Image (spheres, grey):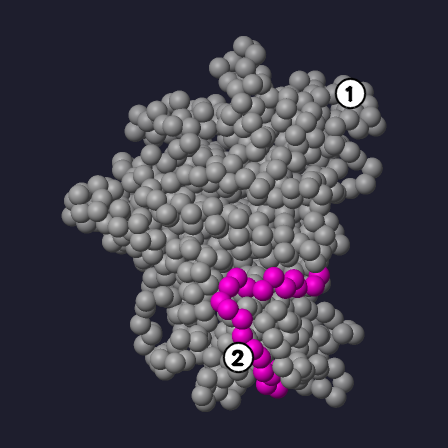
Amino acid sequence: MSDPRGPRREPSGDAPAARTGRPGGTAPAAGRDAPPSAGAAGRSRRHVLRATAAAAGLGLTGLPAPAAAARTAAAAAGQGRDGYLVGRGIADATGEVAEVGMMGYGRTDQQARGLHTRLRARAFVVAERAADGTAGERVVLVVVDSPMVFSSVHREVLGRLGERYGGLYTDRNVMITATHTHAGPGGYSHHLLYNITTLGFHAKTFEAVVRGITEAVARAHADLAPAELSLSRGELHGASTNRSRAAFDRNPADVKDHFPDAIDPLTTLLRIERQGRLVGAVNWFATHCTSMSGDNRLVSADNKGYAAYRWEREAAGGDYLAGTGPEVVCAFAQTNAGDMSPNLDLEPPATPEDFAATRASGLLQYEAAARQLERPGTPLSGGVDSRLVYVDLSDVTVEPEFTGDGRTHRTAKPAVGAAMAAGSLEDGPAFPGFTEGENPFWDAISHSVVYAVSPELRDAHAPKGIAVPIGEMNRVLPWVQETVPVQLVRIGRLHLVGIPGEVTVGAGLRLRRTVAGIVGAEVEDVLVAGYANAYFHYVTTPEEYDAQHYEGGSTLFGRWQLPALQQTAARLARALREGRDLPAGTPPPDLTGKALSLQPPIVLDAPQPGRSFGEVLEQPGEGYRPGERVTAVFAGAHPGNDLHRGSTYLRVERREGGTWRTVADDGDWSTAFRWERDGIAASRATVTWDVPAGAVPGEYRIRYHGDARSLLGGVRSFSGTTRTFAVLGRVAPGPAAAVRPDA
């Protein structure tokens, strides 16, 4: 892939820090370090990772031999090729990692204090290939490791793409989805409700998310090349459970029979191959990114982020800091995960046990996807197309065709139910004094006060006990979004219904059946792309809504919200089937520059008395073995001065002859970066590295890269380096040691 970033920033120091583990099979980039000697190459991290994956019997940068042979034979026979051009791109989308509220659990006390894994945006441009080789109709799929995609981000990304590419990429053909990690920084919405726990809007995090997505799309655009697409499916059990079973059981038999275990076990893989070699993939599987605890304070991509890391970095040996990026780009996307939890015991995770749970869940998702490479997928054929409309969900007349009771109904202004305030008890409860189900106090207020004032709310929202009539609050300040985008994307036989919220499996099935019946597709070839392009909380079936669990209380526009979305999806599907355009409608208002920001700025960084920036306060020990933790503490500075997007706060380096080579950075699972104030202006930066199984014995050191702000506002970079330490002994190549970072 071409790289519009320009040269990568190199740290200062006594020797250039080269990086091991280039993408498999590629020659060194011009101007980079020459490869190590044959003996050293055999001991490089890339070779260790390849041996690890080979031992596990999983494919690496290419298909396993049987599947590769089958794909090559199919291509030779003229099958499996339908004239697609596909590009892949990946970019860093990590925001602030200190003194910013984390998004997802709604806890004001969950303020970030460091970084475990970086958040990344992965983009795929898929275009029809004309007879002359040029690109025709195209779509863009983006999967970003982020709690949500807010309309603020959607609008800004589309604006920047428009500045760069004119009318090539628009709201119609660009689908931006979030993995919904609950361990990412917040504060990048223009709507007040989502910025309460972050002390308002955070411009740095907003810019990091927007730039990450925009750069990923730009790299995918530059990477366009002929490719074969295929689709495969499997089932994954043991990675999800229904956290709202009592509500799900209210559904009729046609839903419950489709999901006998009350989960959606479907794992779908879109493969991208060039001349029989895997170069990218998108996997869809329904489970929440709530493996990381609400007590965690480190920014993390959670289980889906680990699944992508496992494939791109540990299995394929990719290097996120290399100029070209990983050779294989693999996104793990959400679908109808509204009531799906990874916490199989239906208990909120604890820290530090949540790190192991995150890795375990991500590993299951990765393995389920990678196993599908063992057999040929179904080659995709047919066109590429998309449609999008903006719908004011607060004012939709739903026709009897979709309501299920033969009557016309209406949606209403958004309202938060008491059950929403309770939070999801299985993943992380919210406010005390509220419960899922009946809340007699709030129910009484709703029926005697709110409903008496507004019969329209009563008809649309009952039996919800309204805790906050948030639609009325929107008249004063923009609390939540009411006009939202609903999208339909087609790539051959695959159809993606873009919904800007958290769709339960039952609601997702109804949306999928609605679209499948109109376009003539199999239900399994229609997927809900959740958390797409905006955010409006949950979507439940009317039957689930009546239970008023957390998901029903969070269905903002009332009992008929899902039927309204089915009606909209049907309009999109008919237009797509008939090849006609639809009026997009009026987008939501532009709120740029209107969001409140109450976070105090970074005023001054100062080292501890008698110390200098980057000085090592606590040195590592003399020697470590695989499975042990290396810890170093530095005189640091506030990490918000420079987010090091596309770079790193830390490096673990190994001496090879006279050169120090980077073996891990702050995007690796084995490392963690923690920040804390030390007095008023001083900072302590703690770097840990859990020595992986298969680590090469030798001489190592840890480097920290920081940026300090002066009282006049200037920021200067600095670095610190530990003394050397030894990694002793060696175990047989295998998965990285399951050592858990502390909370």
Is the stretch drawn in magenta largely helix, strand or loop?
loop
Residue shown at 58%/52% (left/top)? 360
Residue shown at 64%/21% (left/top)? 250
Residue positioned most to the top: 406
Residue shown at 71%/21% (left/top)? 463
Q: Quadrant of the C terminus?
A: bottom right
> Against 37, is 542 above or below?
above
Q: Quadrant of the N terminus?
A: bottom left
Give, as a three-letter code, the residue at label 2. Pro
Q: Position of residue 604 (x, y in %)?
A: 69, 75
Closer to viewer: mark 1 or mark 2: 2
Q: Which residues are magenta?
A: 718-743
> Against 320, is 56 above or below?
above
Q: Position of residue 198 (x, y in %)?
A: 68, 53
> Relative to residue 275, is residue 9 drawn left or right?
right
Q: Nearer the viewer, residue 144 or 692?
A: 692
To which quarter of the image does residue 469 belong?
top right
Dot 1 corresponds to which residue? Answer: 447
Residue shown at 42%/55% (left/top)? 57
Q: CA distance from mark 1 to mark 2?
A: 70 Å
N-terminal of the pair, mark 1 or mark 2, is 1
Disc number for residue 697: 2
Give, as a three-letter code, the residue at label 1. His
**Within 10 angstroms of label 2, few (less than 14), some, or many (20 or more) residues?**
some
